Amino acid sequence: MISAQSWADARLLWDYHHMHHDPRPCSVAMGLGSHDLGVADVTAELYHQGMAPVIVFTGSTSPTTRARMPRGEAVHYRERALQLGVPDSAVLLEPCATNTGENIEFTKTVLADAGIKVSSVLLVSKPYEERRSYAMMRMLWPEVEVVCMSTSMGLEEYADCIGDARMVIDMIVGALQRVLVFPGMGLAIEQEAPDSVVSAYERLCAEGFTSRLLPDDVVVRPGTR
């Protein structure tokens, strides 16, 4: 049972994780691999709206996706996009990345090999990964403009869609930890977190929403998801 206070705290973090960008046409749409096929849905919708002429889906597998997406995150995303009417010619795959840093670096290589010049990226992710992904893009690919997009669902609707509210809150908490610690690890730009958000994060940790936190020995080294 998730308490009313924990839901309220999770909503604070949920809103903070959103960059609240308005969609606009970009050179490419980049769908970050995860357990959530909704990322592919949003990316396909943006393509149909004319927001990007080409899509790159990036991602291998992780412990949370291996059973759901045995062929790899990028492959399953591509299959979903094709079902939604995106032409095969508009989709590039990056099937090897196992963390967000690799998502970014390997996608840069895929686009360069395809001869596609990139000045702006529609970065499509899970809702609670917008801010962290943005901060990593600004660190690792600073020369491009980044527009963050995700599903427009609210927290409760999203948790119902995923089917595991506790896992969603765990991931929201884990994403906030990464926003806080990645700058010190050289993985992301610094971003200010309001005291109310940090307090909500600390309360959720105290309530046991900790399965997606990085262990102390990992926080001090780069290359983590």
Image (cartoon, helix red, strand yellow):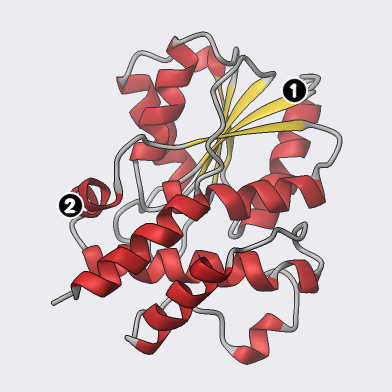
Give the quarter of the image for residue 63: bottom left
User: Of marks 2 and 1, which one's residue comes earlier in the chain?
Assistant: 1
Residue at left 75%, top 22%? 114
Residue at left 49%, top 41%? 74
Type of the residue with mark 2: Asp
Q: Position of residue 213 (x, y in %)?
A: 50, 79
Give the quarter of the image for residue 167: bottom left
Decide if residue 124 is on the left or right side of residue 189.
left
Figure quadrant of the N terminus: bottom left
Decide if residue 161 is on the left or right side of residue 99.
left
Q: Which residue is mark 1?
A: 114
Q: Which residue is mark 2?
A: 160
Front disc: 2 or 1: 2
Given residues 225 and 171, the one toward you in this image is 171
Residue at left 79%, top 23%? 119
Type of the residue with mark 1: Ala
